[in-house]
Amino acid sequence: MRRCHTAVPFGAIMIVCLGLMLTAFVEDSHAGPKKAILVNVHDQTLYAVDDFKIVYEFDVITGQPGKETTPGKFTIFKKIEDYTSKKYKAPMPYTMFFSKDGKAVHGTTWATLRSYLHVYITESVGSMGCVGLTEDDARTLFGWAPVGTPVVILDEATEDRN
């Protein structure tokens, strides 16, 4: 689900934080605009950023207790449009792998509802460690993010947006 920012300070804080984190990925200061994916596990939100501007914001579902989505800095190293999990036998449309242990950003069923339940009711509806989006959002992100796109996973509360 695409959402618009209603609070400018929140967006500004997120962009500044993302800018600081992305400096670890920038090797050449003359490389030009950079794409990146920022996932806030606490808020169950993914931000797609291009040249330090948020171009997409999606609800996501991340890992349940015992199968957490690990915070850190990663890179998309492999993309598969029509993939099925070998371990869980689950369809994972528009898969973008970012960790060697199989974690990926991909489409999943009931992503928006599961994201809401994960944040407000119970974390037990979470994923097995991946970052799940609706199939439409996953398709959009898959087309937007090339192999090599940085993925930053955070697990911190953000300011109240209201």
Image (cartoon, grey):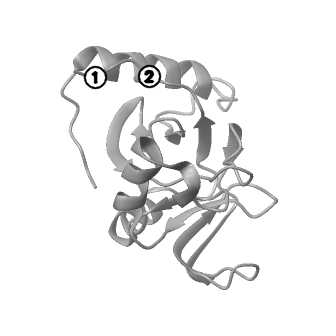
Percent position of residue 30, x then y:
57, 27
Q: Name the side, left or right, on which 28 lies relative to 82.
A: right
Percent position of residue 7, x then y:
22, 21
Q: Which mark is residue 158?
A: 2
Judging depth in this view, the residue of 64 and 6 nearest the camera is 64
Alpha carbon distance from label 2 to label 1: 8 Å
Q: Which mark is residue 53?
A: none
Q: Which residue is mark 1?
A: 161
User: Label 1 neighbourhood size at 10 Å, few (<14), some (14-19), many (20+)?
Assistant: few
Judging depth in this view, the residue of 21 and 25 nearest the camera is 21
For label 2, the SS is loop
Q: Is residue 22 above or below residue 76?
A: above
- In the rendered image, the quadrant that contains the N terminus is bottom left
CB under 8 Å between discs 2 and 1 = yes
Q: Amino acid at mark 1?
A: Arg
- In the rendered image, the quadrant that contains the C terminus is top left
Percent position of residue 20, x then y:
57, 18
For label 1, the SS is loop
Q: Is residue 87 above or below residue 95?
A: below
